[in-house]
Image (cartoon, helix red, strand yellow):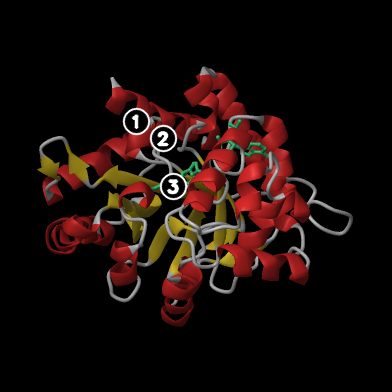
Amino acid sequence: MQYTILGNTGLKVSVAGLGCGGNSRLGLGSGGTDAQAVDVVRAALDLGVNFIDTAEAYGTEHVVGQAVAGRRDKVVISSKCRSRNPTGPISGADAVKALENSLRLLKTDYVDIYHLHAVAPANYEHAMKEIAPALLREKEKGKLRHLGVTETGPNDPRQEMMARAIAEPPWEVVMFAYSMMNQGARRAILPTAKTRGVGTLLMFVVRNIFSRPTALKQAMADLAVSGQVPAEFARSDAPLSFLIHEGGATSLTDAAYRFVRHEPGVDVVLFGTGKQEHLRANIDSILRPPLPEADMRKLRDLFGKLVGVGLDLPDAVRAAAKA
Ligand SMILES: NC(=O)c1ccc[n+]([C@@H]2O[C@H](COP(=O)([O-])OP(=O)(O)OC[C@H]3O[C@@H](n4cnc5c(N)ncnc54)[C@H](OP(=O)(O)O)[C@@H]3O)[C@@H](O)[C@H]2O)c1
């Protein structure tokens, strides 16, 4: 494993971080058991991953609590509270209550990083004025070590909330989307993060678009219709196969992780999975050298201006919305 220092927090973290949300939710999202999910976390720890990202909303905090028992001090735990409930933005007191519940499920008396989860641009002022001060008081008590904020990819494709959060206190760590076909953060977020010493966590690096061929095909078809990618991409069943060759990527997910990993300002690349074989493959990819420069250039030229591509809501949320 390779390790880096997470911005100005001083935390030494693995460059590959296990994400316990998304569609996988450590396998719970596709019918896996708690015991299998615990095994995925433990396998990640055994391979040197020390950064684990979970959240109130994922329903995986109890799994992380079980998996890290006995080695809590070797693990950097990142968790989050919802920034809204069905009636509107949560209060500072609600956030403190959520933190207490996370600590109980995680079986710990502190979280290393506690985020406000999926803050939309319209809720940012409230997050700053109402919720952050309440959580900073908990930080003084030692219940959280560092305060963070995450964006809502599907509802904020232009990353407006993050463009504000990255530029001002109190956020010490931020989580945002960045991928081969969603490259806006390279200009709008990463340079400021680096200058200000804010720790960065990448999400939506693979998601559906680079793990489900049908999702990539649909995205290319939509982009070709609006003239944002050449029409031949929509006609191909494997439009990104040019990345897979001797000396290049070994698979599309390999390309996706290697594209983001080496960008200046990136600290931790999150990957979500419920499968042991994907866990190993993803760690290998994140630890490999950058893609060949010609492939990097082609990806920047072809997709550097796209906005909000590959930012699906979790399948369960989409299904509930349709019901
Ligand atoms: N707003 C927020 O705060 C927010 C939003 C989104 C995500 N996140 C965090 O970021 C983490 C990762 O992001 P993500 O869930 O968006 O997506 P991701 O990790 O980029 O992609 C995960 C998807 O790709 C599949 N996959 C993983 N490795 C694979 C491989 N080697 N080959 C083929 N398929 C593979 C997974 O299914 P399998 O189970 O089959 O491997 C899963 O469906 C989440 O777990 C969560 O911690 C935070």
Q: Is ligand 1 within 8 Å of the beta carbon of the residue shown at mark 2?
A: yes
Residue lying at the far right of the rendered structure: 246
> Is 262 placed above or below 119 here?
below
Query: Which numbered disc, 2 or 3, marks the residue closer to the eye?
Result: 3
Judging from the image, what secondary structure is the residue with disc 2 in?
loop
The image's mark for residue 317 is 1
Left or right of 224? Residue 279 is: right
Residue 246: image quadrant is bottom right
The image shows residue 306 at horizontal and vertical percentages of: 48, 61
The secondary element bearing badge 1 is classed as helix
- Residues under labels 1 and 3: Cα distance? 13 Å
Rendered residue at 36%/56% (across/down): 157
- Give the class, few, some or many, for how many residues have Cα within 10 Å of label 3's Cα (few <14, many ≥20): many
Q: Disc 2 and disc 3: Cα gap in Å?
A: 9 Å
State the image quarter where residue 45 is shown. Answer: top right
User: Cβ–Cβ below 8 Å for labels 1 and 3?
Assistant: no
In terms of depth relative to the viewer, which is nearer, 279 or 108? 279
Report which quarter residue 208 is drawn in. top right
Mark 2 in CB contact with mark 3 (< 8 angstroms):
no
Residue type (three-letter) at the residue carrying disc 2: Pro
Q: Which residue is mark 2?
A: 314
- In the image, residue 31 lies at what x, y percent? 51, 17
The residue closer to the viewer here, 210 or 281, is 210
Residue assigned mark 3: 311
Instruction: Give the Cα separation between the discs numbered 1 and 2.
Output: 5 Å
Residue beneath the point at 28% across and 71% down: 164
Q: Amino acid at mark 1?
A: Val
Q: Which mark is residue 53?
A: none
Q: Amino acid at mark 3?
A: Leu
- For image coordinates 48% across by 72% down, the residue present is 190
Label 3 sits on a secondary structure element that is loop
Quarter of the picture holding the N terminus: bottom right
